[in-house]
Amino acid sequence: MNIHEFQAKALFEKFGIAVPKGVPAKSASEFAAAVKTLGDGPCVVKAQIHAGGRGKGTFTDGFKGGVKLTKTPAEAIEVAQRMLGNTLVTVQTGPAGRKVNTVYFTAAVSIKKEYYLAILLDRGSSRPVIIASTEGGVEIEKVAKETPEKITKVFVDPAVGLQSFQTRQVAFGLGFKGDEFKAACKLVESLYRCWWELDCSMVEINPLISTDDGRVMALDAKVGFDDNSLFRHPEVVALRDLGEEDPKEVEASKFNLSYIALDGNIACLVNGAGLAMSTMDIIKHFGGNPANFLDVGGSASKDQVAAAFKIILSDKNVKGILVNIFGGIMDCNVIATGIVAAAKETSLSMPLVVRLEGNNAAAGKQTLAASGLKLTTATSMADAAEKIVKLVS
Amino acid sequence: MSILITPETRVLVQGITGESAGRHAKLSLDYGTQIVAGVTPGKGGQFFEHGDKKVPIFNTVAEAAKATGATVSAIFVPPPFAADAILECVDAGLDLAVAITEGIPIRDMVRVKRAMAGAKTRLVGPNCPGLVCPGSGKDSHGGCRIGIAPGYINKKGHVGVVSRSGTLTYEAVYQLTVKGIGQSTTVGIGGDPVNGTSHLDVIKMFAADPDTWGFIMIGEIGGNAEAEAARWIKANCKKPVAGFIAGATAPAGRRMGHAGAIVGGAEDTAAAKIKVFQECGIEVAATPSDMADALIRAAKKMGVKLA
């Protein structure tokens, strides 16, 4: 689960991490009051969407930049008005972009130097890793490739937690001295505490900055949480913005279905995450384009299959459906019954290819054959994918 | 022989009074697996009954192991309590803990993994289908089935299968069985980013097992465990190996069902992993339907029998 920058910064403040003063606003009527709290000086107006690359993004009406430095309160309000309700397209949003429902005003600060700081899970060692770089404001992948010597990595032993010598390693690695060094050490400690206590999957400050008046602060903030841990963090769940998620994905989550929308035209309904991923792959392999990832799980009920059908049919790009079920334990006939019911209920008119294998598959195939539905059965995944690709082309 | 388990392995089930655990304990008993104990705190002294079988339930793993000689646990307890259940197996000195539970917080697993360093107990999973060592009866009856995989699709034989995905494992096993090629052991290592046993751990065991003549390694996007295993195979393994990677069409940054199936950088894409497989002499299955055939091709090239 991801949250907005303004929410992440509010969390940072709770953990004692310095951030520039800022106020979010969800409607134009709040703009004037929000800007006023920041004083008369220059301020930065930031479009709040769950995607990076905002500064270099372009709105669909041609307005450039989702992060703008403004000189006066009047200009800040004018810029915010252009952003709110507008759709911002960045390298991470895809061509459709994201609608801006919140604008964040922050006080402008004089930047002395920019850095990069992040904490995430290192899968190789199964430990948290702190990644710091003297190159702020640029993509860390680029730094890692071109100038790896500028990156400091510190692995934390979960048995004892972050040690002081490690925070010093990070702060020295970034070249801090004097009071800035002390401030940086405190910030690294606080960020680690935030990562650990809130079950974050990732925290990233890019850029982390030092200011002309000797402060070290987070100019931007990106925080993601481990979905598996949300049951013990109601305060984090409260930050979820459903407006940032695909409505089909939100609907699917209500039925415990794992669904991800893609931009192709062949919908798939599969049991198991690995099988669902490779069903998308095999559609592509035979020249088609998958419309979604959909895992109905290992013990799908008739109702879940029906809900899954409705969700994939609500995608207007879909021209055909591939059902791929390997029922190890789950009863293939239950799935078949669910498919027939859903197809009839939705008056399905587009091509449907069904591959059923495993437990009680023979009965399932019989149910499909006796249903009177116009569907195509397949003997293997490859056979199924070839058939659906041919039918929609 | 086989790896990690044999048809004689004595198994206890943690959380046996839960719905899913109970259903699968029954399926394992039907398969002929030695399910010798259940553990549910507070229900010690009761029995888990299935047909004419009465499995005693204990309050603790240590008691269950001592009373029944169980050396392996199948863990079905809900996510908030799963880390504790795993560590209880370590404390009881079991050989193997197989965590089926899906949805354990990653931070819990980070701590568990650290706590298990140097321990006698090996962890498989979490978020995995478990292990199957097929038996010699009809539909591989008489084997050891730990977890949620279908037993009947297996066939006793000499091919190993290791995978992060449950259904892709079944797909591979089924293809092999239909072609008359049996399996020594299938191991589902699970779809989480922090797990107890890696691809590399399992393939080292397959490589050393005289009864495993070749194996299929199934991976997916996220992490670099498959590449690590492939490089080891190139340097050390003389057996035929087929590989498959799921997720070539997955968009970057999205979690594809499994907590660990996410493309973070250039190194953990399907294309990058497939390239490493090819460089390491692993026969790559072009599609999931090609997994058994890929292993047959690999075996033919090396002049090795699979059955």
Image (cartoon, helix red, strand yellow):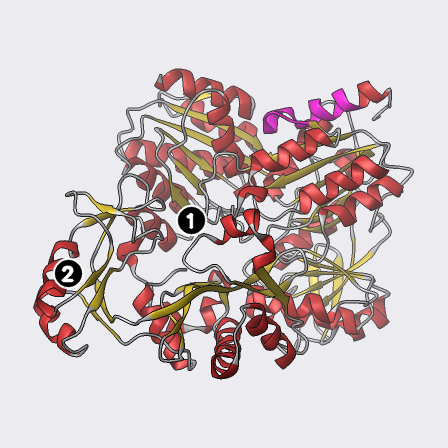
Give coordinates of residue A368: x percent, y percent.
43, 26
- Which residue shows up at 55% across the image and 47% down it? A146
Please tell me in which quadrant of the rendered image residue B161 appears. Answer: top right
Q: Is residue B90 above or below residue B261?
A: below
- SS at badge 2: helix
Q: Chain of mark 2?
A: A
Q: Residues within 10 Å of mark 1 (few under 14, many from 20)?
A: many
Give coordinates of residue A281: x percent, y percent.
50, 31
Please tell me in which quadrant of the rendered image residue A76 appears. Answer: bottom left
Q: Quadrant of the C terminus of chain B?
A: top right
Mark 2 highlights which residue? Answer: A80
Q: Quadrant of the N terminus of chain B?
A: top right
- SS at badge 1: loop
- Which residue shows up at 59% across the image and 53% down it? A148
- Which residue shows up at 36% across the image and 49% down it? A252
Mark 1 highlights which residue? Answer: A257
A364 on left or right of A217 = right
Give coordinates of residue A105: x percent, y percent.
21, 68
Q: Which segment did they paint magenta?
A: B284-298
Q: Chain of mark 1?
A: A
Predominant secondary structure, magenta span: helix
Instruction: Judge by depth and name the residue closer to the eye, B128 or B136.
Output: B128
B105 on left or right of B190 = left
Give the amino acid type for the residue marked by disc 2 in the picture.
Answer: Ala
Give the amino acid type for the residue marked by disc 1 in the picture.
Answer: Leu
